[in-house]
Each structure stands twice: as structure tokens, then as C-alpha cells.
Image (cartoon, helix red, strand yellow):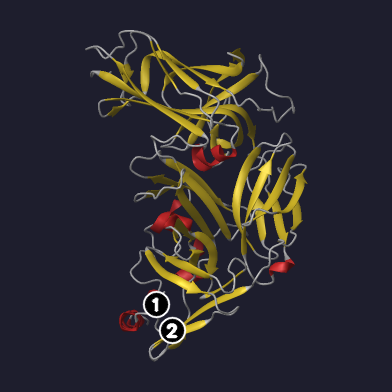
């Protein structure tokens, strides 16, 4: 990116060079069905929010193409005794908001979090939605009993039903009864047995550091293994319903394959499951009650009686406040000095996937398995081409053990491609390019096909994802700036280049040279 000649500390609130940011977290935000997202609205909150910057060094956080890259102020990096915790709330018009809890621990210098936004009106492979209106009288009360229920389909076999008693009135956040001609009800039911529902769970993952457990008023760390979850919203006119004068009943069917992770036994009639509510605004889960499993129409279900609206989750919850994360070191000598993205899946003894993460793999990479409960689990590392590279057991993921995961080389041929960008500014010679993320896709593929290639450190990136002789579109992201390089063929294993005045300036040399000179003027 030619404008990287600009001093990274130019015109920002706190002046420090973004190239010295050591700790980075990347969030890749996508639509649940692969559609193009509208503009995103981002808010950083939480205890350590003041220490979080855009990776480009600005306090303003950017999301070009759904890519959010965060960095930690070098003066506030995590230590062995204190991690950094904050939340990022992501909103978009027509979508369900998500409040993503983030934690950056000492030594975990880079992490990637995939964030999925659910369009409020969309059915997906792991969720169904129903919208319906229920009539109310002049006092704001229902004139008859009403039910609203999702419908099972080929993807989601479980349903959720909301039962509203006659005479029920609806209140806003201030406790005032709302009046109008009807109450609008939106009900989203999630298939807790589908791995795709992991990213649709509140916060985008099953671990949370903001859970109020039974008998407590103080939030703590916990891990959910859901048997069911549902999101209920109601409105009267333009006002959102928060509570009722008469409790409503929520009947939700359970994942038919749900196994109690604490005992290894399948869930059955008579079992007790804790119910938690969740508020997107605060990112907090709160224990509500315990429900007894019963059978209805040959399917296991529970009833939840509630006087307020929220997201509800049913299933086992494990306290993790006293846990220490498993430390991981990846051994992949076949990568040489290159990088390669892999998926890491964590599952229970019954095979239920409870965590999934994208890791930009390099040989001897140090990482962690964060927030896992103290029950026997298993890991699987899956290559970008779908091959399993390693599997193993985690006898106690809560004990702070250190493990080495040795990865087999994928069966496909691998080229180690080097991309190096050097920039020459007039009268200054070669300058250091700020670190930026680089994405790629096959040339001509749709924009939604971009995948992360890696982080270019000082203009250098080495990767095994590209093939000599193939053509790609590249996208470089640094702060709010995006540079697209279309249809570039990999002609050599070493694709290093130097750009600058009097040198290669690409396909639009006049414009790029003007940009280069202007940007270089800002260098001190």
C-alpha cells in the first residue's frame, strides 16, 4: 500500500507508531448465509477498552469489508498476572446485534475470531424465524390467548413456542404499559445440535466471562453446553417490549442428541436443566431457574415461565473462573517459514463440537485453548483443504497444562511463496512499511470469497496457500484503508518487489507516484 509511507502516528489521539503494536486480534465478520453485509457499527467497551486501538494505531475502529483488526497499546500489554478483557458490539441494519467478549492473554500475540451476523428475517441451516402480530385492545391487553411457534424444516428439526395468556399487557424498559393495535412477535429458534449454531450463540462462542451463576449476584467465568436456545423480541409500534403483566410460557424442544457432559448420559425425561437469560446490551448471562425435561410429541422439551424478554439458553453450565488455559505449541516443520490457516475444533466425548477457531499456523506457533471447562475433551486440527492434520485428547483442559501438537503435512503439493514489498521514499531510501493484513481469493471470484492470507510484517509475508502459476486478487487492509490488487499471477516462488520514484509503480504509475510523493512528505 503506497500510502503506508505516511507516519502511522499521524493525526491520532495517542501518538505511537502502529508498527510497534505487538498484540493483535482480528475479527472476520460475515453474514450467516454468505451475503454482503451493510456498513457495520462498532462499539468497544469493558474494563480494558481504553487500551484497545485499531491496528493502524488510531482510536477509531474500522471494519472495511467486515474485517476488524484490533491492537493493544504497547504501554498496556497483558502480563502473566493480568489479561486484557473488553467487548466489541457489532451492529448492522436488519441484523441481530452481537456483543463479542474478547480476552488477550500474555504471550498470545495474535488471534482470529470469526463473527457471524444473523439477518433478523433469515432462516439458516441452524436457525428458524417466525414473525407474527397479536391483537391488543385499547388498554394494551390481549383479548384472547395466543401462541407463536417456529416451524420445523429439513435443517432445523426442533421448534420453540411462545404462549401468551388473555389479558396480558406489555411494558417498555421504563415499566410503562404500551398501547396500540397489535404486538409484533419475532421468535428465532436455534438448533443447538448443529455446529453452525456455535457462531450464532450469544457472543459468538460458548465461553463467557460475564455469567451470574445460581445464588450469586457477581458475574464470573463459565462455559455453556446448550441443549436449546431461543431469541424472543416483541414490539408495540416502534417501542420494544421488555416485560409483561402476566408471565408468558416458552416451550422449546431440545437437541435430540444432547448428552450431559458431566455424566456422559443422554438427556432424558425428568432431568433438570438450568435456564439462563442473556442481554445483548450488557453481554451478561443470568441464571433464571431450573426446568424439568418432559416429552411432547415424541420430542424432549422444557417449559420456561418468564415475565421479561430476552435470549434464553438451556443446558449444562460449567464454572471456569478457577481454570487455567491449556497452552499449545504447534509443530509443523514442513511449513518452513511460511504460514497456513487451519481450523481447530474442540469436542466432548459424545462428539458435540463446543469450540471452533481459525488459527494462522506457523511452525512453533504458541497459542492457547481459552476458557474451556474441566471435563474430558478432544481437539482436531483441520487444514484449509479439509484434511485432518492432528487429533488428540485433553484430559483436563482446565488445569493449565502445556501440550505440543504435531501436524502432518497435507497431501497436496505446497509452494512456499514469499511476498515482499519495499517502498522507497525520495531522499529517504527504503522505509519500513507498517504491518498490515493481506487477504486473497482466486482471480475473478466474488468479493465474499476473500480469505485471510496472513499479516505482512514490515512488508513481508510467506505463505503456503498460493500456487505458482495461479492468479489471485489481493486485498490489503490497514485501518480504514483498503488496497485491491486484481488478477496478479504468481510467477515465482519469490515475488518480492520494490516500489518508489523511478521504480515500478504498478499499472497506474502517474497516480501512484503522486500518492507516493505526497505520503512521503509526511515523514519526519
Q: Callout 1: 10 Å neighbours few (<14), some, many (20+)?
A: many
Relative to 521, 352 lies left or right: right
How far from the left and from the top, in percent, is residue 29? 46, 50
Label 2: element kind = strand
Q: Callout 2: 10 Å neighbours few (<14), some, many (20+)?
A: many
The numbered dot on residue 140 is: none
How far from the left and from the top, in percent, is residue 433? 47, 76
Check the image and report above or below for 272 versus 362.
Answer: above
Quarter the C terminus occupies:
bottom left
Label 1: element kind = helix
How far from the left and from the top, in percent, is residue 70? 47, 58
Q: Residue at x 47, y 86 (%)?
A: 430
Q: Earlier in the sequence, mark 2 or mark 1?
A: 1
How far from the left and from the top, in percent, is residue 22? 54, 65
The answer to whether the residues at label 2 and label 1 have Cβ atoms under 8 Å apart is: yes
Q: Residue at x 64, y 18 (%)?
A: 272
Q: Closest to the observer: 233 or 398?
A: 233
Residue marked by disc 1: 2
> On the image, which quarter does residue 333 sit in?
bottom right
Please indicate, yes or no, whether residue 16 appears anywhere in the rendered image. no
> On the image, which quarter does residue 78 sit in?
bottom right
Q: Closest to the observer: 313 or 186?
A: 186
Relative to 171, 228 lies left or right: right
Please indicate, yes or no, whether residue 336 appears anywhere in the rendered image. yes
Check the image and report above or below for 376 versus 13.
Answer: above
Distance from Cα at disc 2 to Cα at disc 1: 8 Å
Quarter the N terminus occupies:
bottom left
Q: Residue at x 45, y 71 (%)?
A: 487
> On the image, which quarter does residue 224 sit in?
top right
Residue marked by disc 2: 499
Number of numbered discs visible in the structure rendering: 2
Amino acid at each position: 500500500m503506497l500510502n503506508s509511507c505516511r507516519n502511522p502516528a499521524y493525526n491520532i489521539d495517542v501518538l505511537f507508531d502502529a508498527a510497534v503494536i505487538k498484540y493483535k486480534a482480528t475479527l472476520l465478520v460475515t453474514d450467516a448465509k454468505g451475503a454482503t453485509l451493510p456498513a457495520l457499527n462498532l462499539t468497544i467497551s469493558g474494563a480494558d477498552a481504553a487500551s484497545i486501538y485499531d491496528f493502524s494505531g488510531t482510536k477509531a475502529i474500522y471494519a472495511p469489508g467486515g474485517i476488524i483488526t484490533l491492537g493493544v497499546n504497547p504501554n498496556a500489554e497483558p502480563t502473566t498476572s493480568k489479561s486484557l478483557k473488553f467487548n466489541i458490539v457489532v451492529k448492522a441494519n436488519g441484523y441481530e446485534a452481537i456483543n463479542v467478549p474478547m480476552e488477550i492473554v500474555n504471550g498470545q500475540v495474535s488471534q482470529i475470531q470469526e463473527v457471524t451476523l444473523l439477518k433478523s428475517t433469515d432462516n439458516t441451516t441452524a436457525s428458524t424465524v417466525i414473525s407474527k402480530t397479536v391483537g391488543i385492545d385499547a388498554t394494551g391487553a390481549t383479548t384472547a390467548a395466543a401462541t407463536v411457534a417456529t416451524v420445523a424444516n429439513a435443517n432445523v428439526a426442533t421448534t420453540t413456542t411462545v404462549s401468551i395468556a388473555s389479558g396480558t399487557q406489555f411494558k417498555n424498559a421504563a415499566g410503562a404499559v404500551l398501547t396500540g393495535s397489535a404486538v409484533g412477535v419475532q421468535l428465532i429458534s436455534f438448533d443447538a445440535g448443529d455446529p453452525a449454531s456455535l457462531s450464532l450463540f450469544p457472543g459468538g462462542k460458548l465461553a463467557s466471562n460475564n455469567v451470574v451463576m445460581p445464588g450469586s449476584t457477581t458475574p464470573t467465568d463459565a462455559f455453556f453446553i446448550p441443549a436449546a436456545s431461543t431469541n424472543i423480541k416483541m414490539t408495540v409500534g416502534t417501542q420494544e417490549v421488555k416485560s409483561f403483566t402476566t408471565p408468558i410460557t416458552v416451550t422449546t424442544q431440545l437437541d435430540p442428541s444432547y448428552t450431559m457432559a458431566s455424566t456422559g448420559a443422554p438427556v432424558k425425561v425428568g432431568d433438570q436443566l438450568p435456564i439462563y437469560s442473556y442481554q445483548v446490551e450488557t453481554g451478561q448471562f443470568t441464571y433464571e431457574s431450573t426446568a424439568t425435561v418432559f416429552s411432547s410429541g415424541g420430542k424432549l422439551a422444557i417449559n420456561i415461565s418468564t415475565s421479561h424478554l430476552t435470549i434464553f439458553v438451556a443446558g449444562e453450565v460449567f464454572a471456569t473462573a478457577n481454570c487455567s488455559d491449556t497452552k499449545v505449541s504447534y509443530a509443523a516443520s514442513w511449513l518452513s517459514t511460511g504460514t497456513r490457516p487451519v481450523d481447530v475444533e474442540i469436542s466432548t466425548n459424545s462428539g458435540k463440537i463446543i469450540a471452533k477457531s481459525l488459527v494462522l499456523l506457523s511452525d512453533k506457533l504458541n497459542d492457547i485453548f481459552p476458557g474451556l471447562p474441566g471435563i474430558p475433551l478432544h481437539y482436531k486440527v483441520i487444514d484449509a483443504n479439509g484434511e485432518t492434520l492432528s487429533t488428540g485428547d485433553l484430559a483436563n483442559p482446565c488445569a493449565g497444562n502445556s501440550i505440543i501438537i504435531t501436524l502432518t503435512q497435507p497431501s497436496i503439493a505446497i509452494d512456499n511463496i514469499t511476498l515482499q514489498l519495499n517502498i522507497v521514499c525520495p531522499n529517504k531510501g527504503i522505509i519500513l512499511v507498517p504491518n498490515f493484513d493481506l487477504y486473497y481469493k482466486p482471480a475473478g471470484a466474488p468479493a465474499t470469497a476473500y480469505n485471510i492470507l496472513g499479516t505482512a510484517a514490515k512488508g513481508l509475508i510467506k505463505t503456503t496457500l498460493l500456487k505458482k502459476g495461479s492468479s489471485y486478487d489481493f486485498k490489503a487492509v490497514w485501518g480504514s484503508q483498503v488496497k485491491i490488487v486484481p488478477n496478479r499471477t504468481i510467477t515465482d516462488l519469490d515475488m518480492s518487489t520494490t516500489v518508489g520514484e523511478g521504480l515500478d509503480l504498478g499499472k497506474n504509475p502517474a497516480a501512484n507516484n503522486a500518492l507516493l510523493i505526497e505520503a512521503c512528505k509526511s515523514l519526519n
